[in-house]
Image: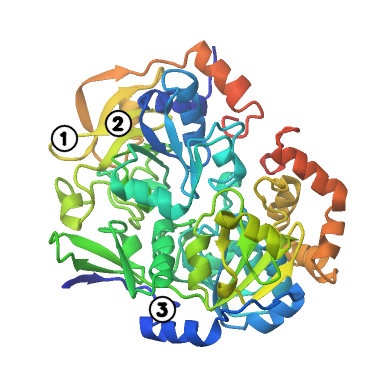
Amino acid sequence: MKVIEEGEGELLGWMDPDEARGWMMERKSRGLEDKRIPLKEAVERFTRDGDYFALGGFGHIRVCMAAIYEMIRQGRKNMAMAAKTAVHDVDILIGGGVVDKVECAYAFGHELRGLSPTGRRAAESGRVKVLAEISNAGFQWRFKAASMGLPFFPARIMLGTDTLRYSSAKVAEDPFTGKPLCLLPACYPDFAFIHVHRCDKYGNAQIDGTIIEDRELSMAAKRLIITTEEMVDEEAIRQAPDRTVIPHFLVDAVCEVPYGSHPGNMPLLYYSDEEHMAEWLRLSRTEDGVREYMEKYVNSVEDFAGYIELVGGEEKMDYLRKLEDLEVPLEAPWRR
Amino acid sequence: MEYNPTELMACVAGRVLEDNRSVFVGTGLPIIASMLAQRLHAPNLLIMFEAGGIGPKIPTIPISVGDSRTFHRGVMAATMDYVMSCAQLGLIDYGFLGAAQIDPYGNLNTTVIGPHDAPKVRLPGSGGANDVGSLCHRTIILMRHDTRRFVERLDYITTPGYLTGPRAREKAGLPAGSGPYRVITQLGVMDFDIETKRMRLTSVHPGVSVDEVVENTGFELVMADEVSMTEPPTERELRLLREEIDPAGIVIG
């Protein structure tokens, strides 16, 4: 294939397919092993300063916020994040000092809520570096290449734009049509946390609602930690195997973390906590505010259960359940 | 009935969408416009979200294009791979886009103002925008109209319009025959000249003059042979927007 153009962005998370096969052969256990550990231990064992990582879910939807708070509490730093529509997660991680580099499909914004003061401040001051640009489909298909054990995946996106120029993709002449084609390099993040609705002790995990790109991410991640709203018996999984999105042999650890996506949305269980989001967006206008938030919600508590108590406990979660079920109207306090 | 510019844009965008077509939707105005079209002339408009929601009956405005409202009573809760593949396969007719900057060929910037590595303003980046602008048959761009946003040259091309002009998309490898279809602002509606692929003014909104549009555009606009006046929002459109679609005024204010 004749290469026509090469992106200038840094190539993150790439492996030769044979190296990837070696990793999968040696590091991923095929057996049924009880992988349950506390989240604190999972963060200690599977995340390292300087790692390049990705989180399951989308924006503030089904993202493992519990793992994010724990990484901040443990003082992880110099990490690079795959910002694949990263909203509240990347914002908190930048504010908490964990992330200082991103590969950016979407970051520094809060979707309908507007822009993120923390992320923007960090990017504009140079405290956070954008190592490469990409699009959402670009990330999806980087993970797809990895999940198929291929060096790249071809697509008809990013062509002719600066998104390609600042990405790690290449443009080559398609040997079949002769037309230019974007080649997205495989992406194997050092680790990924994926939050799911239910999972057994071996890591067989089921997700309700949209899967986003988690099927491919779960196969691409070098180390994969599943956090789950609920632990279920192996038998419950075997009763409905068509619902399983992530099988046990991809999974390195399983952590039970009820409400683990708060303040984000866990589809069909609880909606996002817009009051909490508004508090963050207000506080994060200043660095002092960011410190105040971290002190109040991250460092003053032992673990995620302590945080849930602090944000309103069962009463708050009951309200968010009703909001998810459309029983109460949505308020948008960040508009005030 | 009185109306604000956002309501007008939602109505104008909604009218562009046809029944039994599909549309790739982002947060905010695109959702409002699509929900409005479904309640009026396009009950079978097929709405698709990048996180995997397909054909939902959207009950209330989603905050994210991935939240649970995006597959509420849908026909499928799929994956990003699935929806993006649908777009690449040619199954998505319309796509909505917004931007901080647009140039005469409909190229869009949502990434950075100033140099990429020393940004004056850092914006969120492509998200799904480049994919929508690359893969949907026709894109509809919704944005504010002023000379800071309508510029001759972008600081950064996030999403392809017609790139440098006729045949440039195809030459770059983008799907044949795709590209920007309408630009809808608070001042008027534009399409793209068939010969030159440059932006062309086709209608001005009520109370807006052609001169006002020209003054607020930082490049030379092609003029349609006859620049018409946009039909103002009807009472029915406004009632649906305010009472059913966005009663809390989250998007329409």
At label 1, the amino acid type is Ile
Question: Residue B177: x, y in percent?
Answer: 20, 42
Q: Residues within 10 Å of mark 2 (few under 14, many from 20)?
A: many
Q: As drawn, is B240 to the left or to the right of B215?
A: right
Question: Residue A223: x, y in percent?
Answer: 57, 78
The image quarter containing residue A301 is bottom right
Q: In this view of the protein, can residue A69 be seen by the observer?
A: no
Where A6 sits versus B242, above or below? below
Question: Residue B146: x, y in percent?
Answer: 40, 38
Instruction: Give the residue number, with chain letter if any, for mark 3.
Output: A14
Q: Nearer the viewer, residue B51 or B214?
A: B51
- Residue depicted at x 79% and y 65%: A304
**3D distance between C-alphas at marks 3 and 2:** 43 Å
Instruction: Give the residue number, with chain letter if any, for mark 1.
Output: B194
- The secondary structure type at the circle numbered 3 is loop
| Quadrant of the snapshot with the N terminus of chain B | top right
**3D distance between C-alphas at marks 3 and 1:** 43 Å
Q: Residues within 10 Å of mark 1 (few under 14, many from 20)?
A: few
Colouring rule applied to residues: rainbow
Q: Nearer the viewer, residue B118 or B246?
A: B246
- Residue depicted at x 45% and y 36%: B47
Instruction: Give the residue number, with chain letter if any, for mark 2.
Output: B190
Asked if marks 1 and 2 fall on the same chain, the answer is yes
**3D distance between C-alphas at marks 1 and 2:** 13 Å
At label 2, the amino acid type is Met
The answer to the question of whether label 3 and label 1 lie on touching residues, with beta carbons closer than 8 A, is no
Asked if marks 3 and 1 fall on the same chain, the answer is no
Query: Disc 3: which chain?
Result: A
The answer to the question of whether label 3 and label 2 lie on touching residues, with beta carbons closer than 8 A, is no
Asked if marks 3 and 2 fall on the same chain, the answer is no
